[in-house]
Image: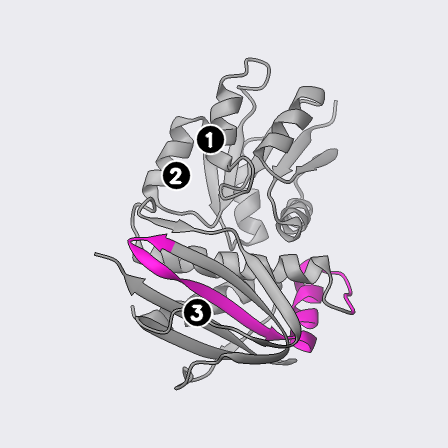
Amino acid sequence: MGKKVLIVDDSSTMRKIVTRSLRQAGLDFDKILEAGDGQEALTMLQAEPVDLILSDINMPNMDGLSFLREKAGNPAIKDIPVIMISTETGADILNEAKSLGAVGSIKKPFKPEQVNEIIGNLI
Amino acid sequence: MNLADIIAESTKEIFSSMVMMEVTEGAPKANIVTRLTNSISGTVGLGGSYKGMIAIHIPEPVALAITTNFLGLEVESIDDDVQDAVGELANMLAGNVKAALSEGGSDIKLSLPSTVFGDEYTFQCMDDGDIVIMPFNCEQGEFLVDLRLRAEN
């Protein structure tokens, strides 16, 4: 069965860039889903579980840390790995994301090879 | 590293790695720029241990070229894609400035990006504290990165 990834970012530009970077990095996802915030991501995951989630931190409605918190409390989706893709690089915030279950982070701006390096090991 | 160096390095890194465009910085402007014509401005506010904002002001033809490169699709006017792309540029600039000012990250909060555009508009923000307005050049013309910052004790 093909692998699926969910990109969670309020910026449509960034969702396009991440999608392009996954393809440029040669990462083999059969389906790429997109959500504009954490709440929309939770709704989508109820209907269609994925193999990997790439999530921004600063978003309207439900931010990335709140999304991680909600996801951790839902047995159906809590084990899906999440990588944060964000402008946030502070240790306090990234440590909180890690404590809530994030398995890695990519700083914006990034190059496709960085995406490959971090995500390639997980799929 | 001073604020002008932070802006120069951040802007060049963002354009080189994400927009696939090389830009070169000019000398910071001596005067505050308030009146903009046929342009789009993307802005992110900073709060907490530093207050202020960072903005990027881009003339429309340059914004269209940047968005075309950034997204890999042709755009002909300032539409939702251009507004989102310019907002995301401001967001990444703000993230880099925050990273340079705060080790932990939780003492400075960033707003979500916003954009304004038009044939002619006035851009007003705090005019005390540290102000750096730096021009950048690319093949299609010049744009400005505008940082206004005040440390809160």
Nearest to N terminus: mark 2 or mark 1: 2
Checking the image for residue A94, the label placed there is 2
**Residue B96 position within the rendered picture, expressed as x and y whole percent measured from the top left:** 42, 58
Given the current orientation, which residue lies at the most extreme left position?
Answer: B153
| Picture quadrant of residue B19 | bottom right
Instruction: State the CA–CA distance, disc 3 to disc 1.
Output: 37 Å
Mark 2 lies on a secondary structure that is helix
Mark 3, residues whose alpha carbon is within 10 Å: few (<14), some, or many (≥20)? Answer: few
Which residue is under mark 3? B125
* Magenta-colored span: B47-76
Instruction: State the CA–CA distance, disc 3 to disc 2.
Output: 31 Å
Which dot, 3 or 2, sits closer to the camera? 3
Mark 3 lies on a secondary structure that is loop
Residue under mark 1: which chain is it in? A
Mark 2, residues whose alpha carbon is within 10 Å: few (<14), some, or many (≥20)? Answer: many
Q: Residue at x 34, y 66 (%)?
A: B149
